[in-house]
Amino acid sequence: MAEFHSKIKTIEWINNYSKMVDQTVLPYEFKYVNITSGQEMYDAIKTMIVRGAPAIGVAGAHGVVLYAQELAKENLSRDEFAKRLLEKADYMATSRPTAVNLMWAVEKQKEIIKNSTADIKGIVEELKQNAIKMENDDIEINKKIGDYGAEVVPKGATILTHCNAGGLATVGYGTALGVVRSAFANDPTIQVFADETRPRQQGARITTFELTMDGIPTTLITDGMCSYFMKKGMIDMVVVGADRIAANGDAANKIGTYTVAIAAKYHNIPFYVAAPLSTIDTSIKTGDEIVIEERSRDEVTHINGKIICAESVNVINPGFDVTPHELISGIITEKGILRPAYTKSIAEAFRL
Ligand code: MRU
């Protein structure tokens, strides 16, 4: 059996550049790209060569190292170096607006820039080591999420997931798909239903790719089909990832997740969100404060470069929606499964 998660790192720091899987060409092609400048990293995040909240967090951290390497060559004073690098870090954090892991990771790098007592070379090295630590921590955290989540997967369950919260959305193993992987290791009779996830088709292109590579039985359905299969009793639970979770448990994830959560509630099916604590933004009280990315009209009007609608039609393309906390059975984190009332359980998890 091909072990996708143990062989492939979505993003990795190599000597003085960042190596990542190009997710825009999956599943037709599996290739890596080397990102060698800060601006290239900004563009890679924006154009979704790298995507998924934890993966773009690490990408943002790598991006700050790349900018640091560039500025280190400019003969600046240490103060000027730090000032310019902090500005570049802020710019990096604006490459996508919804996933808070990006801002979280860039903020961690900014703390090093502000607090380090090292010279310029030393700061670059500290930033690099911190980025590498984030990569390693990400995999460890996902395995913990997977193992906690596996405890609530019924024997022989069919798990519905939306978008891709897998190894390719993280450095490896995945959050929602980490739960699937850990559950499958104990019980090979489980299976996955993967929503296609229009418009970017992360479910079809990426989730089915990585799960079938790991030999996990997977059925692809289109986004509108979930309630049909729920009514038929064919879905036992839903597990999705998240891009940002507010202090009250409201969770932003790929557009369409909210619909799945409503359908799950109606059919009495447990709906779990799997995410690291770095996805929880305790600075915001509710999901109303989450900025939702607006993406280009072509993502909706075209499939594989071909127009699929009247050329002049109006289009709105929000990348994410917010599932209200009332619809969420539990938030699976590296500190265990948080249950309602989330304001209390989230605050406690941060104290642990
Ligand atoms: O636009 P994307 O592909 O970056 O969106 C990804 C998602 O919505 C994922 O479900 C989320 O980031 C969690 S990834 C572990």
Image: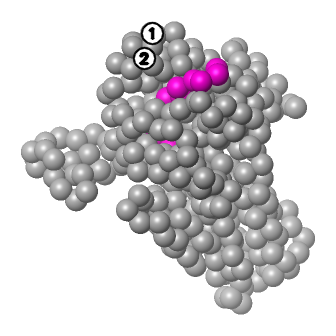
Type of amino acid at the residue the image marks with label 1: Tyr
Q: Quadrant of residue 87?
A: bottom right
- On screen, residue 317 versus residue 352, left or right, reads left
User: In the rendered image, which quarter is residue 186 located in?
Assistant: top right
Which residue position holds label 1? Answer: 266
Does the Cβ of the disc 1 residue fall within 8 Å of ligand 1? Answer: no
Mark pair 1, 2: CA separation: 9 Å
From this view, report whether residue 67 is shown above or below residue 21.
below
The mark found on residue 230 in the picture is 2
Residue displayed at 84% across by 77% down: 122
Quadrant, the C terminus: top right
Check disc 1 and report its element: helix, strand or loop.
helix
Spot occupied by residue 159 in the image (x, y as percentages of width and height): 53, 28
Question: Of 245 and 159, which appears nearest the observer?
Answer: 159
Answer whether residue 350 is magenta in the image.
no
Q: Which stretch did the figure color magenta?
A: 154-164
Which of these two is toward me, 132 or 41? 132
